[in-house]
Image (tube, rainbow, N blue to C red):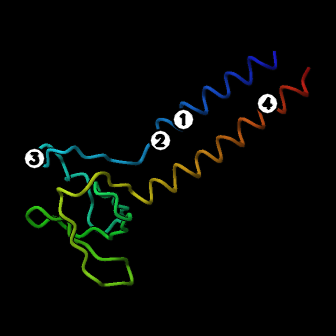
């Protein structure tokens, strides 16, 4: 009985974690990429194709072939990133929500496992 509850709860937790992905990846062909899902005023973490360090950007708009924003809410330094160099864009807010949800889910699984082990 214990193994089946543990197995079911593990499967549910892994399914939940997999479905809460918050990264948008972009292909080599820039013309196929759809940047319309980026919202102005949100902070994104941009991963570059060339392996350079990830950049946090407060996204403002798209000008030509560039993503334009600022370095942060308090830092008004303008950041311009060419679309051709972008490998992935991660929404920081969604990532925090997914992490919190995973922690809550793990606590729920632990509670189910503990309660089922005490019931026997």
Q: Position of residue 64 (x, y in %)?
A: 8, 64
Q: Reading the chain from its start, which is encountered first: label 4 or label 1?
A: 1
Residue drawn where x is 72% and y is 43% of the image? 107
C-alpha separation, residue under disc 3 versus residue under disc 2:
27 Å
Residue drawn where x is 17% and y is 56% of the image? 84
Q: Nearer the viewer, residue 116 or 27?
A: 27
Q: Reading the chain from its start, which is encountered first: label 3 or label 2?
A: 2
Q: Is residue 92 above or below residue 99?
A: below
Q: Position of residue 55 (x, y in %)?
A: 36, 67
Q: In which quadrant will I find the C terminus?
A: top right
> What mark, if any, has residue 31 been given in the picture?
3
C-alpha separation, residue under disc 1 versus residue under disc 3:
32 Å
Q: Dot 2, crowdedness within 10 Å: few (<14), some or many (≥20)?
A: some
Tell me, yes or no, whether the two marked residues, 1 and 3, touch with CB atoms within 8 Å: no
Q: Reading the chain from its start, which is encountered first: label 1 or label 3?
A: 1
C-alpha separation, residue under disc 2 versus residue under disc 4:
23 Å
Q: Is residue 10 above or below residue 106?
A: above
Question: In front: mark 4 or mark 3?
Answer: 3
The secondary structure type at the circle numbered 1 is helix
> What mark, if any, has residue 20 been given in the picture?
2
The secondary structure type at the circle numbered 3 is helix
Q: Position of residue 37 (x, y in %)?
A: 25, 51
Question: In front: mark 3 or mark 2?
Answer: 3
Tell me, yes or no, whether the two marked residues, 2 and 4, touch with CB atoms within 8 Å: no
Residue picked out by circle 1: 16
Q: Dot 4, crowdedness within 10 Å: few (<14), some or many (≥20)?
A: some
- Horizontally, residue 61 falls left or right of residue 10, namely left
Q: Reading the chain from its start, which is encountered first: label 4 or label 3?
A: 3
C-alpha separation, residue under disc 2 versus residue under disc 1:
6 Å
> What mark, if any, has residue 113 been given in the picture?
4
């Amino acid at each position: 009985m214990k193994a089946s509850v543990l197995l079911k709860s593990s499967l549910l937790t892994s399914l939940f974690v997999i479905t809460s992905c918050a990264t948008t990846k972009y292909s080599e062909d820039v013309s196929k990429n759809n940047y319309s899902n980026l919202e102005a005023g949100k902070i994104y973490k941009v991963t570059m194709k060339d392996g350079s360090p990830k950049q946090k950007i407060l996204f403002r708009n798209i000008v030509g072939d560039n993503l334009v924003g600022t370095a942060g809410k308090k830092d008004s330094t303008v950041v311009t990133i060419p679309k051709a160099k972008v490998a992935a864009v991660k929404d920081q807010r969604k990532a925090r929500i997914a992490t919190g949800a995973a922690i809550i889910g793990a606590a729920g699984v632990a509670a189910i496992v503990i309660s089922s082990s005490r019931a026997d």
